[in-house]
Amino acid sequence: MMMTPDECEPDAFRIVNVLAELHAFARAFSESSTATEFRTTLRVAFVANAEFAWRLIETERFTSGRRNRVRMLCFESPEAMRRAVQERLEWAAADEQFRATQMATPGDFPGVTVDWVHSKDFASIFDPSRRSLREEICATSSARTLMLR
């Protein structure tokens, strides 16, 4: 049985409202210092009549000449996608806290942390811990993940 346009209208408004909310969360993450440093952006989409219609597109930009990595995470519900986006916001907050405590420079002394780690070694020493934060916090799985690039 096909729905009439009048029957579809409430669903369309609900979808638009949910997408607007998710877009705001995705933009907040993409503008965080963590996302900026890791060169990661999030976009949201809804694909009508698709099996997993709620989509989160995550782009990682590389400066080393490698192609950007683009993943599309497909969710069964807006609630699952909302959890995934909120987890990324929680990761960004935890990462900012990690940087404030572990990577702070004493008295604005340039180039070293309070543990005397030189700034040129920040990535090799701190990135594994920062990435494990993401793995711990970003636990919501998508129903399907597609590598677009």
Image: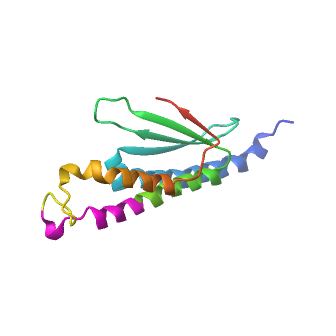
Residue 11, horizontal then vertical, whole percent: 71, 48
Which residue appears farthest toward the bottom when viewing the image? 107
* Residue 103 falls in image quadrant: bottom left
Span highlighted in magenta in the image: 93-109
Quadrant of the snapshot with the N terminus: top right
What secondary structure is the stretch in magenta mostly built from? helix
Front residue of this view, candidates 70 and 109: 109
Residue 23, horizontal then vertical, whole percent: 51, 50
**Residue lying at 43% horizontally and 53% vertically, measured from the top left:** 132
Counting the numbered discs, the total is 0
Which residue appears farthest toward the left when viewing the image? 109
- Specify whether residue 94 is painted magenta: yes
Which residue appears farthest toward the right when viewing the image? 1
Residue 10, horizontal then vertical, whole percent: 72, 50
- Locate residue 78 relative to residue 102 in the image: left or right: right
Residue 49, horizontal then vertical, whole percent: 71, 35
Front residue of this view, candidates 97 and 54: 97
Front residue of this view, candidates 139 and 67: 139
- Locate residue 29 relative to residue 73 in the image: left or right: left
- Locate residue 93 relative to residue 14 in the image: left or right: left
Coloring scheme used: rainbow
**Residue lying at 43% horizontally and 39% vertically, measured from the top left:** 59
Residue 31 appearing in the image: no
Residue 117 appearing in the image: yes
**Residue lying at 28% horizontally and 48% vertically, measured from the top left:** 124
- Specify whether residue 92 is painted magenta: no
**Residue lying at 19% horizontally and 65% vertically, measured from the top left:** 105
